Amino acid sequence: MRKFLVRRASVVLFFGVAILILGGWFGLGLFKNLGGANDNFFADDTPAAQTNAEVRRIFGDGEAEQIIVLFESKNRSGDVTSTAYAAEATKLLDKLGAKSIHSYYTTGADQFVSRDKRDTYAVVALDGDKTTQYDTATAFAKDARSDVFDVSLGGSLVGQQQTQEQAKTDLEHAELISLPILALLLFWFFRSPIAAAVPLVMSGLTIAGALAVARLIHYVVPIDTYTLNVITILGVGLSIDYSLLMVNRFRDELHAKKAPDVAAEKTQQTAGRTVFFSGLTVMVCLLSLLLFPVGFMKSVSIGGAASVAVAVFISVVLLPPALKLMGKTIDKWSIKQHKTLSKGWHRLAVAVTKRPVMFLIAGIVGIAALVWPVKDFAVKSFDWHVLPSNQSAYHVGKVMDERFAVKAPTVTILAHFDRSPSVAQVCQLAQTAQNIDGVESVQGAYVPTVGQPDCAALPYVLEGLKMQSPELAAVAAKQAAQYVKGNNAVLHVVSQYDPNDGRTKTLLDRIRNASYGDGVTLRLSGEATRSQETMDVYVRLIPVAVMVVVLAMVVVLSLSLGSFVIPLQAVIVNSLALFISLGVLIMVFQYGWLANVLHMNVSGGFGLSIPILIFVIAFGLSMDYAVFLYSRIHELYDTSGDAHKAIVEGVAKTGPIITSAALLMFVVVASFALSHIAIIQQIGLGLAVAVLVDAFFVRIVFVPAVMQLFGRASWWGPVWLKRITIKHE
């Protein structure tokens, strides 16, 4: 097969490139059908998720569909309780055509009035799917003209849609920033414009193929908007990594006076094998995310694995024929390259292997300092802090926090009665919920307030209201109908605690165990409930995912290297960069260190899915570099039998390649850290730190030091494993 691919180079290359180009054209259709919402960060098979779907089915909307319309007084002079302000706001809201409106002017609730009474807001629900609702709301905000106040849109739905739009814009900016820098670095590393062009062409074909695969998968499993960023990061980064390794090996073979076809075959046999096992390890890491029943994780797992698979296919199947056809032309117009860099890596490898204990101790001290902040790791729900700061949803969230003495509901109670509930029963339900320790307030039908008649007398009061003011009674009935339908009633509970606070779990238990009377069954949903249940899912499955990844890595590296010891070394050593990366993320996004300088959004914590995702991708990339280094050392050890010499020569030969690949990967992921979205910033910065630490510290210092201490024992493996390990010629 290897010889066929090289000997039929023109045919293989023509059909391969044609398929990828057509696939890219097909994959562009994915942009029209992408999803992406805060719901994607919650587990999708929990009781709370099922209850949330039931609330939406019965009541027509849920917490994810809420749109906030914020009215801010111009010149800070208006009063929301004035007749003029009320008339203007009501007139504008009527134009929106909402199916439900909750505001100060429909409820009289003080929660809709800012502390200085200059601002107010309305929570509205619109007809149509999310895109239609967003389009309707933005058209309304664009046309809203008033001399009294300014109008802004916020809420979860608006935040979701604006984040998707910003993600696409940031993706374009990241590519525009990174590609010129990558081109210059590639020319500097290869000293040849033709050789430098190969990784760029390969990365474009990889993205085209990955988009095609992702669109095919999208017909079965919805692909998230953020997946585009992961596909681009991995597609561009790994394409450059793999092509750097392949092209460098091909040129080495040419410089050894081998014919182009022989050099291409040898490149595929050695570097191609390394790329295959490297890609396999990264794919296994990414596919481990499928263990988590979370839409975001599934989407990134599938999209990322598709990107890696295409990069490996192009590197192993299409690149060798292309290299053969280029032959010595790949060095045309090249600039003479100095050997000083390789000599420097050789001297460093000699120094590390001469004093391995000293280097390990110094490294551990440095690691401890950077990992220390991990003790303060905080889990936090996604809120306005992670939204793009240039979007209205960010502004509305900030204003709500600063000027209003109200929190958004975080617990939804769906109550099912054995028959259509009376006014008194619904009132009693709300009153019971209000009296639970940890509940700040309750929103729903017939919620008791100060000065209101007790629940038993409320039905008679409402009957009297019908007689005195039928119009006002009709408004009250319309509002109540939003919370009571058939045998069901819904309440939205404002908790005193953050959704991820440990006390929230106790509050949820109190709500479930309270006595609401006979014939009533309760189910809970809402952000707090879904966050807690998602947290439980993560806690249960993270150890399983870790075991799967570690086991897979040990198996793959054992088959590749013929050793059981080195894979275990790799798993432990590779984890160092991950913890350092997490420590840096906490310094920036929790402590706020250098956040202004780096233009990062300080979020105060992390959604648990983000560090898991960073760990998985960074672990895969670190195994990527590990395979590069260990495979070359293994090749040298096979031919010489000298463990020390193999380590030194392996570091000297791969050090420039690994660090060059790491710098290129750093440019790719760092460009995404320039995003306006905190989620993408965290992924970009976390991966950037992990890549640099792994390549310039772990791979070049820790690995040779540990291998030197183990000596020949590093290559221990049972006889049967040695038999099935591919030997280097």
Image: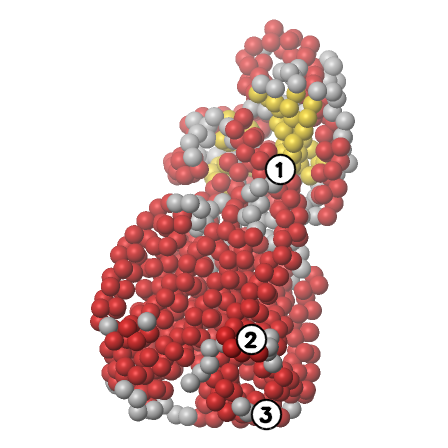
Q: Which mark is residue 47?
A: 1
Residue at mark 3: 351
Q: Check residue 720 in the rendering and tell me which mark sits there, or answer none.
A: 2
Residue 485 in view (yes/no): yes
- Is label 3 in contact with label 1 (beta carbons under 8 Å)? no
**Residue 459: quadrant of the picture:** top right
Label 2 – label 3 distance at C-alpha: 36 Å
* For discs 3 and 1, the disc positioned in front in the rendered view: 1
Q: Is residue 670 left or right of residue 29?
A: right
Give the amino acid at mark 1: Pro
Sequence-earlier tag: 3 or 1: 1
Front-most of residues 31 and 403: 31
Task: Name the colour scheme.
Answer: secondary structure
Secondary structure found at label 3? helix
Point out which mark residue 347 bears: none
Instruction: Report the quarter where the N terminus lies.
Output: bottom left
> With respect to residue 432, does 639 lie above or below?
below
Residue at 51% x, 58% y is: 287
Horizontal side of residue 465 vs 127, given as left or right: right
- Report the amino acid beneath label 3: Ala
If you read the primary sequence from the N terminus, does the residue marked by circle 2 or circle 3 appear first?
3
Q: Residues within 10 Å of mark 1 (few under 14, many from 20)?
A: some
Label 3 and label 1: CA atoms lie apart by 58 Å
N-term mark: 1 or 2: 1
Q: Residue at x 30, y 76 (%)?
A: 3
Is residue 186 shown left or right of residue 545?
left
Q: Residue at x 47, y 71 (%)?
A: 278
Kind of element beneath mark 1:
helix
